Image (cartoon, helix red, strand yellow):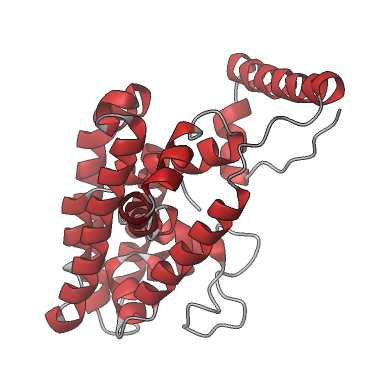
């Protein structure tokens, strides 16, 4: 068997900076490739629970819910003010520019800064939005299909990966911090309905995940919860600092002498929060 993969740049130091962690991660990689190769050779393809068509339908419905939010009037301006995307665009940390042609549209924005900016503001929006609506609809309208999905949520690898990833993003999302970043947008008539959509979907997603997990996420996923709890207080200070810097930096007129030093501090805050969360884009 063989496997070809790409490690993101910021992950290399985290996984291979010293001999012990490098050996641990390489052993994990080797053991899983060996296990998967041996299983395929001797047992054939793993059994499929017959949920492919259901998953395809759920993905399509979830995408429509997600796109409906993005097409809400004023969403692009909300995104640009409620996240530090303007700071990320000013950084020099990527191999490619954040935008394909320089236009300030969602279609022109590359995927990595899109995810990175939402994680900095503790929304993690692209990791969960739309999932709660379709799973809750499935649970209420087609309970037998929901029961089948729940039965295989942890023994069918594609579904397990999806459910666990969504759960991790929901646990990392912080409604209080989300609201504070959103408050950077002064236009309440635009900000309020968008935040209402987002917060309602977050509650819906968490609730249906807890049905699947059979209890509160904090109890069913103690390792993730422990990591979040351990880092909550220091991250809160970093977010406080970033929000204050964003508000001050954005109020400065173009070309102001104080803008560059503030941008340097903002870039440091982006780096610090990314390391605290262990996540970028």
Report the side of 75 relative to 106 (left or right).
Answer: left
Residue 77's place in the image compared with 195, above or below, is below
Q: Position of residue 163 (x, y in %)?
A: 45, 41
Q: Position of residue 101 (x, y in %)?
A: 61, 83
Q: Nearer the viewer, residue 87 or 263?
A: 87
Identify which residue is drawn at 47% across, 83% down.
Answer: 104
Report the side of 48 relative to 106 (left or right).
Answer: right
Identify which residue is drawn at 42% across, 44% down.
Answer: 144
Report the side of 192 relative to 61 (left or right).
Answer: left
Q: Nearer the viewer, residue 115 or 200?
A: 200
Q: How many marks?
A: 0
Identify which residue is drawn at 13% across, 79% down.
Answer: 188
Residue 195's place in the image compared with 51, above or below, is below
Quarter of the picture containing the N terminus is top right
Q: Position of residue 251 (x, y in %)?
A: 21, 78
Q: Position of residue 26 (x, y in %)?
A: 69, 21
Q: Nearer the viewer, residue 11 or 29?
A: 29
* Viewer can see residue 270: yes
Quadrant of the rendered structure where residue 12 is? top right
* Viewer can see residue 92: no
């Amino acid at each position: 068997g063989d496997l070809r993969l790409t490690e993101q740049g910021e992950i290399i130091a985290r996984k291979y900076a010293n001999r012990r962690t490098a050996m641990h991660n390489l052993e994990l990689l080797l053991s899983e490739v060996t296990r998967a190769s041996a299983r395929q050779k001797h047992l054939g393809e793993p059994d499929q629970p017959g949920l492919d068509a259901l998953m395809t339908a759920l993905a399509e419905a979830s995408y429509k819910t997600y796109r409906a939010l993005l097409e809400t009037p004023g969403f692009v301006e909300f995104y640009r003010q409620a996240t530090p995307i303007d700071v990320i665009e000013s950084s020099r940390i990527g191999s490619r520019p954040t935008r394909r042609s320089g236009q300030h549209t969602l279609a022109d924005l590359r995927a990595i800064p899109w995810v990175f900016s939402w994680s900095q503001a503790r929304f993690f929006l692209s990791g969960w939005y739309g999932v709660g609506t379709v799973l809750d609809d499935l649970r209420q309208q087609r309970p037998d299909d929901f029961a089948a999905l729940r039965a295989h949520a942890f023994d069918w690898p594609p579904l397990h990966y999806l459910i666990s990833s969504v759960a991790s993003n929901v646990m990392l999302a912080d409604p209080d911090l989300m609201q504070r970043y959103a408050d950077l947008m002064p236009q309440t008539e635009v900000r309020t309905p968008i935040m209402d959509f987002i917060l309602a979907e977050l509650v819906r997603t968490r609730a249906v995940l807890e049905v699947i997990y059979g209890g509160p996420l904090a109890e069913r996923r103690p390792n993730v919860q422990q990591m979040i709890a351990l880092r909550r207080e220091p991250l809160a200070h970093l977010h406080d600092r970033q929000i204050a810097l964003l508000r001050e930096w954005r109020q400065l007129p173009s070309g102001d002498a104080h803008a560059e030093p503030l941008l340097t501090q903002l870039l440091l805050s982006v780096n610090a929060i990314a390391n605290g969360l262990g996540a970028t884009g």
